Image (cartoon, rainbow, N blue to C red):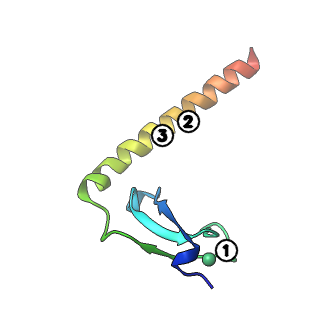
Amino acid sequence: MCDKDHCVLRTSFFTRNFGRRFSGCQHLSLDSDQACKFFRWLDKGPCPRGRATTPIVWERFKRLAAEAEAAKNERDNA
Ligand SMILES: [Zn+2]
């Protein structure tokens, strides 16, 4: 069974909880129905600054990923 001894410290990357710290099972996966879902938040909720910053960080991340993909395609076509 999962308990705090089998958990690792993690940081949420989801928009609504961006930057929140939580303790989650080392086998935690949200992509699989059969994977472990055990986790608990270590804070009381997302801070207002984190909530305001999340869209900016995501927008920058998506732009950089698109630029990296374009550069890769340009290199592959050269
Ligand atoms: Zn587990």
Counting residues from the N terminus, which is met first, the one under dot 1 or under dot 2? Answer: 1
| Residue of label 1 | 35
Is 14 situated above or below 74? below
Looking at mark 1, is its residue's CB closer than 8 Å to ligand 1?
Answer: no
Is 72 situated above or below 37? above
Disc 2 and disc 3 in contact, CB within 8 angstroms: yes
Please name which of the two marks, 1 or 3, marks the residue nearer to the observer: 1
Residue 65 marker: 2
Q: Secondary structure at mark 1?
A: loop
Q: Which is nearer the eye, 25 or 70?
A: 25
Counting residues from the N terminus, which is met first, the one under dot 1 or under dot 3? Answer: 1
Residue in the image at 42% along x and 57% along y:
15
The amino acid type of the residue labelled 3 equals Phe
The amino acid type of the residue labelled 2 equals Ala
Looking at mark 3, is its residue's CB closer than 8 Å to ligand 1?
Answer: no
Relative side of 20 to 69, left or right = left
Is 73 situated above or below 36? above
Q: Which is nearer the eye, 67 or 20?
A: 20
Disc 1 and disc 2 in contact, CB within 8 angstroms: no
Relative side of 57 to 35, left or right = left
| Residue of label 3 | 61
Total labels drawn: 3
Alpha-carbon neighbours of circle 1 within 10 Å: few (<14), some, or many (≥20)? few
Q: Secondary structure at mark 3?
A: helix
Q: Label 1 to label 3, Cα distance in Å?
A: 28 Å
Alpha-carbon neighbours of circle 2 within 10 Å: few (<14), some, or many (≥20)? few
Is 7 situated above or below 21? below
Q: State which image quarter holds ligand 1.
A: bottom right
* Percent of width and height locating residue 37: 58, 76
Residue found at the very far front of the displayed protein: 5
Residue 1: image quadrant is bottom right
